[in-house]
Image (cartoon, rainbow, N blue to C red):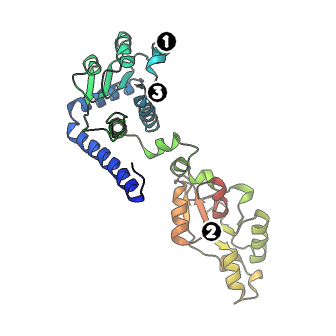
Amino acid sequence: MMGTHDETIAKAREVLRIEIEGIEALIPQIGDSFVQLVDACVKSLDQGGKIVVTGVGKSGHIGRKISATLASTGSPSVFMHPVEAMHGDLGMLQEGDIMLALSYSGETHELTNMILPAKRLGVPVACFTGFGNSLLARLSDIAVVGQVGREACPFNLAPTTTSTAHLVLGDALAMVLLERRKFTKEQFGLRHPSGAIGRAISMRVSDVMRTGEHVAMVSPETTVKDALLRMTACRCGSVIVAGPDRTLLGIFTDGDFRRKVDQDLTILTRPVEQVMTKTPTCIRADALAVEVLKIVEKRKIDDIIVLDQDGRVAGLVDIADLPGLKIM
């Protein structure tokens, strides 16, 4: 009976080693059938179809994860429970779809019973299985066979290594399809709008910048005193100095004022153009918002001027706004 600290660690490590060995055993088995599956999926997806993943028991749980990964990486997919499929859910299958069935033994009758009805609907059937001579493999149009040595279960019964094998085969399929179909980071972000990853990838600077009355902007002849009043009114830590056509001339920050007032008490009456920074840090409005974080980290500044495609002032990014937008 296992109970000591060292025995617990040793057993956990043994399970990991067994499953790693199972994954490594899959690598040389990837071959023509996997290529056929990828080609069939691309054909289906390109004509507006989807990948319908199915499995029961532990394979069903793995199938749900595979389907979710496919869908989030640009390959439309749904999971269909094989029992429910025989009671109406087979209607999920449409012309142009492809079905992917998961069963390591290949003898799961809930799966094999639905293969022929699916084929009668004109849907090609592929499978992940451990045995090429299994009923599921023989009934399928494409059988990707991946055999592993043993389960991590001491009784060699509970699906462990075999479940992992199907999981990584699903990841391999999803990633190959991602590249074949030229799925981009921007498209990934659009499918994850609420997560940190999605925000970082999909949000543009134009989505996070201040505009209009929330941006302090003055002409170059404005006095420093009036520029400070404008900053206060807009609740900004800086004022943008621009020409009449929003041509950028410079920036003046509250930090600049504090540093200069110690040296020159008459600064309040001077034109802001005499004390402004003439080469401020800028970013394009159509740049990814995550680029703002890179600039902030590198330059250690709080305000970044945003320019439109013509190089004119479009707005301002204030670092104080970023936490509320959940990109920082």
Q: Which residue is mark 2?
A: 302
Marks 1 and 3: CB-CB under 8 Å? Answer: no
* Crowdedness near tag 1: few (<14), some (14–19) or many (≥20) residues, C-alpha within 10 Å: few
Residue 181 visible from this viewpoint: no
- 1 vs 3, front mark: 1
Q: Which residue is mark 1?
A: 87
Label 3 vs label 2: CA separation?
45 Å
Q: Is residue 179 left or right of residue 311?
A: left
Q: Is residue 89 left or right of residue 19?
A: right
Q: Element type at marker 3?
A: strand
Mark sitting earlier along the chain (2/1)? 1
Amino acid on which the number 2 mark rests in the picture: Asp
Q: Which residue is mark 3?
A: 78
Amino acid on which the number 3 mark rests in the picture: Val
Label 1 vs label 3: CA separation?
17 Å
**Number of numbered discs:** 3
Q: Element type at marker 2?
A: loop
